[in-house]
Amino acid sequence: MKQHTMHAILLEPEKKPEILLLPIEGLTHEEAIRDVLEGNYGALEFFKIQNDISLFILVNDFSAILGMKPNRYFPAPDEKQIIFGKAIFIAAYNGESTDREGTLDMPIDICKIFIEQIDKNFTPCKGTEKPHHKDIIYYDNKGQTDERAYIWREIKKPDRLSKPLPAGRVNFYGRETREIMEINNHFFKKVILKRK
């Protein structure tokens, strides 16, 4: 059976951007992205291509705390921001139209144009860069009165763990607090930061 695929762009540390083929079927598509990015991912709208459609950057949600290699700097005005680990550039509906959602195939010639621009505007890292403190701060209830800032601190595997709460490629432990997180056999404890 022929598998249907779509084009995106892969940006790996210390490599040139290249065209990436991804399956288009729902769960297979999601899992393929997680495989490439080595875990759960977040999306950042980068560039509006046309009405309803933008170019998004997908990166591993926990790339900084997992110690993934520095990849490239964002272009100005965000030139101090660093992409850690692999990144996927993908075309997708941007939410302007409520009846359209999902990712879209980019023709090879369009991929090549974007690759040229990525290579030109995203400065490669030296390889020694470290995450900024704000890159490893996460939030519960962001923007609400009970907002809490926290970091994940790596720990040894606890002797006793409750039943896991799976969330993609991550397992959380602690039904209400989710104070322990497991990613790729690494364990992290949630450490609440004091308000300044």
Image (cartoon, helix red, strand yellow):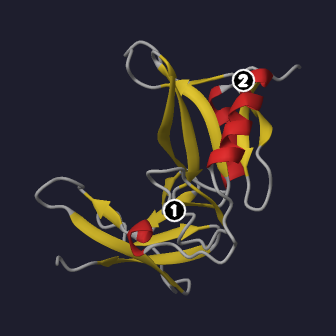
- Sort mark 2 into few (<14), some (14-19) or many (20+) by Cα contacts within 10 Å: few
Horizontal and vertical percent for residue 49? Answer: 54, 23
Q: Disc 1 marks which amino acid?
A: Asn
- The answer to whether residue 16 shows anywhere in this view is yes
Circle 2 sits on which residue?
A: 110
Label 2 – label 1 distance at C-alpha: 38 Å
Q: Nearer the viewer, mark 2 or mark 1?
A: 2
Say which quarter of the image contains residue 63: bottom right
**In the rendering, which numbered label is found on residue 171?**
1
In this picture, residue 91 sits left or right of residue 22:
left
Task: Say which amino acid is labelled 2.
Answer: Ile
Tell me if residue 81 comes above or below residue 5 in the rendering: below
In the image shown, does 162 or 181 lie closer to the viewer?
181
Where residue 86 sits: x, y (%)?
68, 55
**Residue at (75%, 20%) from the top-left corner?**
107
Name the outermost residue toward the left.
145
Please tell me how crowded label 1 is: few (under 14), some (14-19), or many (20+) other residues with Cα within 10 Å.
some
> Which residue occupies 64% across, 68% down?
68
Secondary structure of the residue carrying tag 1 is strand
Horizontal placement of 144 versus 86: left or right? left
**Residue at image coords 45%, 54%:** 78
**On the rendered structure, is 163 left or right of 178?**
right
Q: Are marks 2 and 1 in contact (CB under 8 Å)?
A: no
Query: Of residues 122 and 99, which is closer to you in this image?
Result: 122
Q: Which secondary structure, mark 2?
A: helix
